[in-house]
Structure formats: structure tokens, C-alpha cells
Image (cartoon, grey):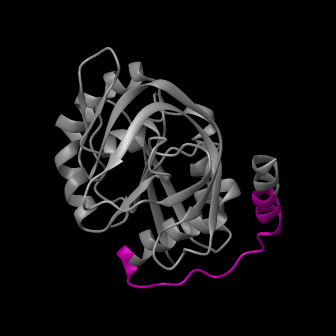
């Protein structure tokens, strides 16, 4: 029997706009397929567990990011970078996305270094980007699928050469309000500004994360299908609301 081990990074500090709900979706969609799941929450001062298949880090205010950034970089950074290089799956939302990159520069304070597992950098802008977002996927083999979510950020994130966009913005601002791109992915590391939480209304993306995490651990696997009638109805309803 397969087991999925999820490490929730800084759940006490980084949980804006229901981001914790993404963990619930990963657990449930794995369990529906008979996959055992363990969730390990860790925060400032804690060591990285010896076995992890998927890391998740949600969003937070600048204050919380300043609190945890030194711990993330200095205590956990080396190990997380090695795990990312080995194909372990990461999902970062908003502040988590920013600190998975090279750095985040808040508007009126010193730069916060990130762990650099995504080739992106972020600098705060004057205008806050708030609203629902509709995105066409640009992930390999998933270009015919879409993502919906809610963004609320002042950060302007720009992709380097090694990072690819998660999607093309059809409605909303995305990474920086300029290039019509949203999120980033590199190896099995994914970052996005989509809150909501993200995964309940985008079941295909949840399954992508689970499948990648288990395939990295056990060898290539293909998840069995689930009845996503309600999830897809929520997805379509979100598109309807966003498009008005």
C-alpha cells in the first residue's frame, strides 16, 4: 500500500485565505484511493523530517514572513534544496511562493532571502492586486486545463530562465500585472498566488501533486479516477462568476 507523507511548513504562521484547506484536499483525495497519509507540521526551530514526499507552505503577511525567513533559509534551506533537486514535490502559495524563490523585497523593509528552489524573485509594488483569477495552464501535458482562485498580493514576481509559468492569466493580475503569467514551476516545485484555497476547485492540480509525489517515491504510477462532479461544478461556477 502506498503512503503519502506531507510536511506542512509553518502552519501557525502561514495560513491566509483558507490555505490550510489545501492539505485537507490532498489528504482526502489520497485516502479515497486507499493511500495512507501522514501530515507532519513543522515551524520555527523544528528539523525537516527524515521522510517527506510533499511540502506545502501557505501565505502570510510580511510580518510573518520576516519572522520565519531566517529559520527557513538558515536552518532548513540546505536540506530543502537537496530534496527539491531529488524531485520531492513542493507547493508554495503567495508568501510561500515568494520565499521558495531567490528573495522577496517588501516595500519598506530589508530584503528577505528565500531558498531558491524556484528561479524567481519578488519585489513589492505600490498597488495591491486583489480579485478572482482565471488561468489557462502552461504545465506540460496539462495545457488544455484551467485553474481558478483568488489573489491578494502587492508582490511583483518575475521568472528567471529556469522557471516556467504555471499558467497564462485570462482574468486577473497574476505574478506582476505585466506579463499575463501566473505562478511558476521548476522540477516538481510549484508556486502560485492563487488562494481560495486552491485545490478544492482545481482537482486535477491536486492529483498532479499527489501523482508526482508518489511517483518520485515508488516509481511511475497513475492515480485511479475519482468522481469529481461536485469539484468540477465548483470550478465551472467560479469561472462563471469571474467572467461576469
Whether residue 184 is situated above or below residue 207 in the rendered picture: above
Q: Residue at x 70, y 56 (%)?
A: 201
* Residue 202 position within the rendered picture, expressed as x and y whole percent measured from the top left: 65, 60
User: Is residue 190 in view from this perspective?
Assistant: no
State the residue in front, 33 or 192.
Answer: 192
Whether residue 201 is situated above or below residue 228 in the rendered picture: above
Q: Quadrant of residue 170?
A: bottom right
Whether residue 201 is situated above or below residue 115 in the rendered picture: below
Q: Residue at x 45, y 55 (%)?
A: 6
Direction from residue 235 to residue 151 in the image, left or right = left
Direction from residue 206 to residue 50 in the image, left or right = left
* Residue 179 position within the rendered picture, expressed as x and y whole percent measured from the top left: 44, 50
* Residue 56 position within the rendered picture, expressed as x and y whole percent measured from the top left: 45, 49
Q: Which residues are magenta?
A: 216-236
Residue 225 in magenta? yes
User: Is residue 174 in view from this perspective?
Assistant: yes
Q: Residue at x 47, y 39 (%)?
A: 94
Direction from residue 58 to residue 202 in the image, left or right = right
* Residue 110 position within the rendered picture, expressed as x and y whole percent measured from the top left: 24, 19
State the residue in front, 70 or 187.
Answer: 187
Residue 167 in magenta? no
Direction from residue 218 to residue 194 in the image, left or right = right
Amino acid at each position: 500500500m502506498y503512503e503519502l507523507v506531507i510536511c506542512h511548513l509553518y502552519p501557525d504562521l502561514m495560513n491566509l485565505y483558507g490555505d490550510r484547506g489545501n492539505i485537507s484536499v490532498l489528504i482526502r483525495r489520497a485516502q479515497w484511493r486507499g493511500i495512507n497519509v501522514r501530515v507532519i507540521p513543522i515551524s520555527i526551530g523544528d528539523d525537516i523530517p527524515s521522510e517527506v514526499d510533499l511540502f506545502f507552505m501557505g501565505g502570510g503577511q510580511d510580518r510573518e514572513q520576516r519572522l520565519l525567513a531566517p529559520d527557513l533559509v538558515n536552518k532548513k534551506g540546505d536540506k530543502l534544496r537537496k530534496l527539491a533537486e531529488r524531485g520531492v514535490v513542493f507547493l508554495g502559495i503567495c508568501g510561500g511562493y515568494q520565499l521558495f524563490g531567490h528573495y522577496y523585497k517588501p516595500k519598506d523593509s530589508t530584503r528577505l532571502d528565500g531558498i531558491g528552489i524556484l528561479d524567481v524573485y519578488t519585489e513589492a509594488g505600490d498597488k495591491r492586486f486583489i480579485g478572482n483569477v482565471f488561468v489557462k495552464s502552461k504545465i506540460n501535458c496539462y495545457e488544455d486545463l484551467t485553474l481558478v482562485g483568488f489573489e491578494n498580493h502587492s508582490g511583483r514576481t518575475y521568472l528567471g530562465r529556469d522557471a516556467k509559468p504555471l499558467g497564462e492569466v485570462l482574468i486577473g493580475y497574476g505574478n506582476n500585472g505585466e506579463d499575463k503569467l501566473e505562478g511558476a514551476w521548476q522540477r516538481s516545485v510549484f508556486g502560485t498566488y492563487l488562494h481560495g484555497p486552491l485545490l478544492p476547485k482545481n482537482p486535477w492540480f491536486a492529483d498532479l501533486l499527489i501523482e508526482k509525489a508518489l511517483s518520485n517515491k515508488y516509481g511511475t504510477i497513475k492515480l485511479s479516477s475519482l468522481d469529481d462532479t461536485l469539484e468540477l461544478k465548483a470550478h465551472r461556477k467560479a469561472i462563471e462568476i469571474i467572467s461576469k
